[in-house]
Amino acid sequence: MPLRDAARSACLSRAFLHSWRCRPNLTLNSDTLCSKAHVHKEDFSNIIDSIMRNHSGIRVKILKLQLFTIACHNLDSWLQVGVTPGIEELTVVASIFNMNYNFPCSLLSNGSGNSIRSLHFGRCAFHPTAELCPLRSLTSLNLYFVHITGDELECLLSNSLVLERLVLSHCNELICLKIPCMLQWFSYLSAITCSRLQVIDNQAPNLSSLYLSGNVIGETSQMKNLTMNCSKGVCYARANLPSIMPNLETLYIRSGGEVVDTPMLPTKFLYLKHLTICLRYGTPPPFDYFSLVSFLDASPSLETLILHVGQGPMEHLHDSVLGHSSPLRQLAEPHSCSLKNVKITRFSSAKSLVELTCHILKNAVPLECLTLDTIYGFRCSDKYYGRCQFRDKSVLREAPRALEAIKTHIEDKVPARVKLTVKEPCSRCHAVPVGGW
């Protein structure tokens, strides 16, 4: 039963009141507390206070205090009631009116730390020390806008020997992140928008999935899955990752500012199977898409390639293949690859993009599916959306030219075994108004 309905029913039934007070899972935020039509925000704190008093002495398994815009002065007393031995999941997101809140680590040292499996802190300070009791059951730690230093986080990790996942976001006091070697179960790390983070020193033997904003620093040879979001990420990944992450199987690069073409290098991604490259909208041209052949040449096991082209307004498309007199470029020697599925979104008439596509058709013998989408984003044909995502007018103006480039330079090169899917702008949502754009 939803929390709001349970509270209302408790007012009418003595038996249900006892059941309500014994409720082991509490999610307290402005959405679950009560109807917005009947309760003002200034009353939320009193409601939470009443709920927590009713739960005094009752074992709580899951406690989520997501205060956001709820002004409060009794957070410590609420936590004293809820954080007791037996608690398994704790979420504390402090109010924007109390962002200097300092979580009392002593609450985790009275036996409560033995049972906690998940900790999620947001908009507060958290300063664990060496005196913190071991968190023997903690498998997931999520810190969002949390004031914590690298030494303090290392201390916490050293007390969490079964930790599997660590998610960090906007933890701007972190400069060096050290993952101790004793974390044998640790497999997933996400560190995004931590503005001062410079070094990740990983000693955990089984870390296999990494999500980063910024360049990767340090060797993590066992890494299998990497997502990185940084400027000039394509060039960085090709030049550095094969040597520091030789066992990568899945790589997602979200990049902007690619002013240098991808270099051809001898290093290899021997185990890479899935590659996604997303060039952020607004990246200044020209970028030579044909230079991405370097990734294909370096990845003999690559099966899936997804390329999201997001390079600025189409008016900046200097080198269209249409009307171009010079022949399409080809490599001097054939480079066979194992690609089975290729998808390119925001496909345009850029000559280098057509050259890349033709290279794939010629060299990827196992290729089964090629999808060329002249726009990008969700469409009304998807059952969850009633209308296609709005597109920049320059993309819609370029789409007919892209379709012409596909018909002129690509269609006749598609082998019979390959399923070619060409996605055009939606005739309903992307219709050109009278008089044109």
Image (spheres, helix red, strand yellow):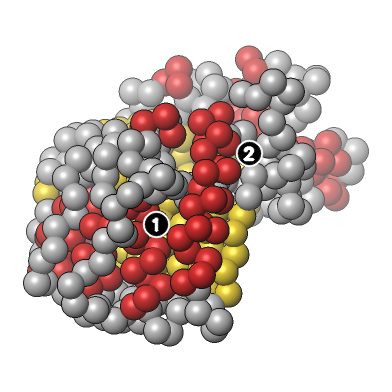
Secondary structure beneath label 2: loop
Q: Residue at x 54, y 50 (%)?
A: 404
* Label 1 sits on residue: 354
Q: Quadrant of residue 195?
A: top left
Q: Earlier in the sequence, mark 1 or mark 2?
A: 1
Secondary structure beneath label 1: helix
Horizontal and vertical percent for residue 101?
A: 36, 27
| 277 displayed left or right of 387 | left
What is the residue that sits farthest to the right in this orientation?
12
Q: Quadrant of residue 359?
A: bottom left
- Vertical relation: 102 (above or below) 407: above
Q: Amino acid at mark 1?
A: Val
Between residues 155 and 212, which one lies in front from this camera angle? 212
| 152 displayed left or right of 51 | left
Horizontal and vertical percent for residue 54?
A: 66, 39
**Label placed on residue 389:** 2
Residue 103 at least partly seen:
no
Horizontal and vertical percent for residue 228?
A: 29, 52
- Vertical relation: 44 (above or below) 159: above
